[in-house]
Amino acid sequence: MTTSVIRQKTSLQDSVLEMLNTQMVVEAHSSAAYLSMSAWCYAQGLNGSAEYFRKQSGEEREHMMKLFNYIADAGALAVSPAVVNVESNFESLRYILVRALEMEIEITENFNRMTEQCHKVRDYQTARFLQWYLDEQFEEEQQARRAVEIYDLMNPKDALFDIDRQIHHLMKKD
Ligand SMILES: [Fe+2]
Ligand SMILES: [Fe+2]
């Protein structure tokens, strides 16, 4: 298909569409990863953290669907993501909290790169759409960083129960 024919169906350029579909996979993976973290926490009796991660999992799915809707509304083809390599064995709550922070930092980087690419190909509409994700990432990174801080500020040996409660309090109220 020539570019002009594609353009009659969708305003999205190939490189932008590919990027958005790739990010759908990343959001689906985050959703599955958080669900797996939630499951581990429940099994340890860390119900506060388990609920926190279950909610995160739901939010990541919403992020994925927001991309799906954008692609579909633009008249292009969204690809339903396959999720592989989801960690399910964790050594500790701290490991999970650090892993969650690392994931969020990587995802912020994705959105920075995607926004840069949109500017390069002069797709300012998609760049503006991605701004929502950058704002969201700012919050999510901050929250994930705070969770690690809370863990480290309290003495985990004596305070795992309280740490769990504090992490539960971090849940965004809406
Ligand atoms: Fe996300
Ligand atoms: Fe996230």
Image (cartoon, grey):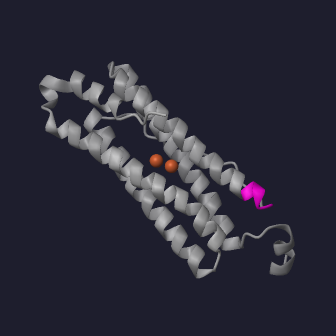
From the viewer's perspective, tell me whether residue 22 is left or right of residue 4.
left
Give the answer, above or below, for where 8 lies relative to 66. below
Place of residue 89 in the rendered image (x, y in percent of width and height, measured from the top left): 37, 34
Relative to 154, 33 lies left or right: right
For residue 13, above or below residue 98 = below
Is 153 included in the stretch rendered in magenta? no
- Residue 149 lies in what quarter of the image? top left
Q: Is residue 1 left or right of residue 138?
A: right
The image quadrant where one finds the N terminus is: bottom right
Res. 103 visible in picture: no
* Magenta stretch, main secondary structure class: helix
Q: Tell me the magenta residue range.
A: 71-75
Residue under the point 40% across and 50% down: 139
The residue sitting at the top extreme is 45
Q: Is residue 41 visible?
A: yes
In the picture, residue 161 is in which quadrant?
Answer: top left
Q: Position of residue 30 (x, y in %)?
A: 49, 45
Q: Is residue 109 left or right of residue 67?
A: left
Which residue sits at x=76%, y=70%?
Answer: 11
The percent position of residue 67, horizontal first and vertical second, equals: 64, 54
Q: Residue at x 55, y 49 (%)?
A: 27
39 versus 139 height, above or below: above
